[in-house]
Amino acid sequence: MLNKIAGFRQVLMISVILFINIDLLSARPPYKHFTDFCHIGERVPGTSGHEKAGDYIIGKISNPEVDSFYTHGAWFYNIYKRFPGDNSRIGIAAHWDSDIDCPGANDGGSGVAVLLSLIDTLSLNPPPMSVDIIFFDGEDVDKAALLGSNHFASKCVDHYSFILVLDMIGDKDLQIFQEGHSVQFFPDLVDSIWRIGMDIAPAVFIPAIKYYIIDDHYSLIKYGIRAIDVIDFDYPYWDSEDDTFDKCSKESLETMYRFLLRIVYPEYIY
Ligand SMILES: [Zn+2]
């Protein structure tokens, strides 16, 4: 019994130490980023909304890298923030553009919001491994032309342990099934990521395939990068003018933020 108490105290102390070491309070909350970003409106490449949204993301990051390219009659901007670390390199990505006639709150906006909060936290608390945060442009051009991720993957020389692609992660009724192509190519990676998800939010992460989706992970896989998609595709407002911020929730965004914290700080105890 004494041993058990000592063990419990040790765990408690470790969690307190880790809690102190990771300053979560200084990060701007995902929902704040989300409402501000959605306020910009549609982010169709070649429009002023697209320009404003790009400026918003760049303005929230210190020393971002911007990779611009011209195609399909418009300028596109992939935006990166890299955090160096000791061990392997992982990537966490979301697209930031939106489709024509779709405000893209959940589709694009939700991923951007959570990644911006994660950048706030990573800036204050260096991660143990190298972490690249990636904002892809041009995913929704011509119904999933995946321009930004193709551009990134075609010139990628870095080795990634894996890249997680996040999309549509803000739905009030958040349920994330495993994505078929991800499981087909990287079943073990999907399993371990879902184990983390189920630990953080058992009602959200469902360990079964429901859809096969062409998303940014698809172009990364094509170029040999270990990438999987984390997406809640059961969203009735997808690709419509009703994909607005009120269909998403603060709780869902915070759940996904905590899930990502566990990925980038594997030892962190909540
Ligand atoms: Zn999308």
Image: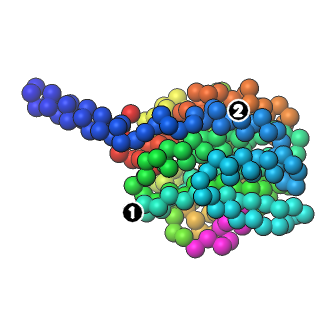
**Is residue 191 shown to the viewer in this render?**
no
Which of these two is toward me, 170 or 250?
A: 250
Report the residue marked by disc 1.
86
The residue under label 2 is which amino acid type? Thr
Residue 243 pos. (x, y %) = 79, 34
The answer to whether residue 86 is left or right of residue 221 is left
Report the residue marked by disc 2.
35
Residue 130 pos. (x, y %) = 46, 60
Which type of secondary structure does the marked residue at label 2 adopt?
helix
Q: Which mark is residue 204?
A: none
Q: Main secondary structure of the magenta part?
A: helix
**On the image, which quarter does residue 32 sit in?**
top right
The residue segment tinted magenta is 148-157
User: What's the residue at 88%, 51% (across, down)?
Assistant: 47
Q: Earlier in the sequence, mark 2 or mark 1?
A: 2
For the C terminus, the image quarter is: top left
65 relative to 174, above or below: below
169 in the magenta segment: no
154 in the magenta segment: yes
57 relative to 185, above or below: above
Residue 100 pos. (x, y %) = 88, 45
For the N terminus, the image quarter is: top left
The answer to whether residue 109 is left or right of residue 269 is right
